[in-house]
Image (cartoon, grey):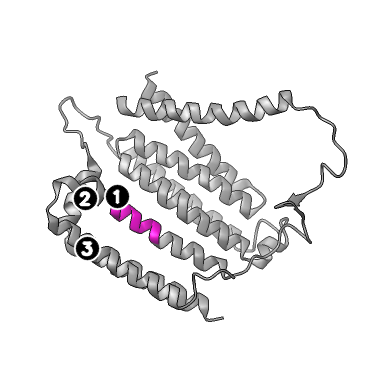
Amino acid sequence: MKPYAVIGAFFVVGLILPLVTVIGATLLSPRKPNPIKGDIYECGLKTVGETWVQFKIQYYIYALIFVIFDIEVVFLYPWAVAYNRLELFALVEMLIFAGILLAGLLYAWRKGALSWV
Amino acid sequence: MTAEQFVFVVAALITLGSAVGMVTSRSVFVGALWMIAVFGGVAALFILVGAGFLGIVQILIYIGAIAVLILFAIMLTPRVMGDPNAPRYNRQWPLVAVMTTGLAAVLTVLVLRTDWPLAQEGTPVITGFAVELGKGFMTTYILPFEVASVLLLVALIGAIVIAREE
């Protein structure tokens, strides 16, 4: 349990820091609201139409590709942790593993799945 | 109450409370956000029982990727996004109620009938699970490891083929 005390302390500090920022800003900031200040905007622009709209289906492919490479990271992680206790052969294995997925990335690239829509 | 028990109670309350929030929220989108909190609580429970690597994977995959996928799926569905106050029940709800009650009953019986042994003094604790896993991947389980890569490749190409055909 001991090593996790550090994580617990980190967690507590991580909770306190944003709270201090938010509460501090609430206490210190002057409050003079007017309709223009209270207006809804996104990226500095006024929003157009409803907020709850259907987004483009093409975005889904980014999420899917992200999930696949996220899982690849999970496979890479144990390999990286055990790296200095493994033979050179392990590096070749990992290169094969990453190489197969690199082929997938190239395929996605060629198909234009990575281009912004 | 020891520190471990305190952390367990907090993590369990967060998990259960968020699960209740998930199934009772009116909007599917808000429900998905509650689900992320459930994933976080489960990750804390994993870490608490000594499965640190699983806890990290839970955060990385479920919070990092699966939750994003689900939020995307909701945001891309016109009926859900078009009407945030859409009805919460459809006509299949009695069937679902029967099934979930049955599942809950089975799980309750199983939990009550299972003998939960406590770890004895001197029980070997798995340390450096990720290191052992990494060694296993590179020696004994090399074929499943490489096959996983092919599986991910198939999933990637399949996703592109399905999504690009409009």
Instruction: From the image, state whether disc 2 or disc 3 is nearer to you.
Output: 2
| Chain letter of disc 3 in the image | B
For residue B144, the mark is: 3
Seen from the viewer's position, the closer of residues B110 and A111 is A111
In the image, taking residue A18 as reference, residue B133 lies left or right, namely: left
Residue at 49% of width from left, 56% of height from top?
B99
Residue at 47% of width from left, 56% of height from top?
B66
Residue B139 visible in the current orientation: no
Contact between labelled residues 1 and 3, with CB atoms less than 8 Å apart:
no
- Which residue type carries mark 1? Tyr
Name the main secondary structure of what is drawn in magenta. helix
Please determine if labels 2 and 3 lie on a single subunit.
Answer: yes
- Which residue type carries mark 2? Gly
Q: According to the image, label 2 marks what residue?
A: B134
The outermost residue toward the top is: B1
Classify mark 2: helix, strand or loop: helix
Classify mark 3: helix, strand or loop: helix
Q: According to the image, label 1 marks what residue?
A: A77
Q: Which residues are magenta?
A: A69-76
Contact between labelled residues 3 and 2, with CB atoms less than 8 Å apart:
no
Residue A33, picture quadrant: top right
Q: Which x, y percent locates residue A45?
A: 76, 54
Q: Is residue B148 above or below residue A15?
A: below
Q: Which x, y percent locates residue B80?
A: 66, 62
Residue at 33% of width from left, 53% of height from top?
A74
A74 falls in the magenta region? yes
Label 2 neighbourhood size at 10 Å, few (<14), some (14-19), many (20+)? many
Q: Earlier in the sequence, mark 2 or mark 3?
A: 2
Q: Which x, y percent locates residue A41?
A: 76, 51
Q: CA distance from mark 3 to mark 1?
A: 16 Å
Q: Is residue B130 above or below residue A18?
A: below
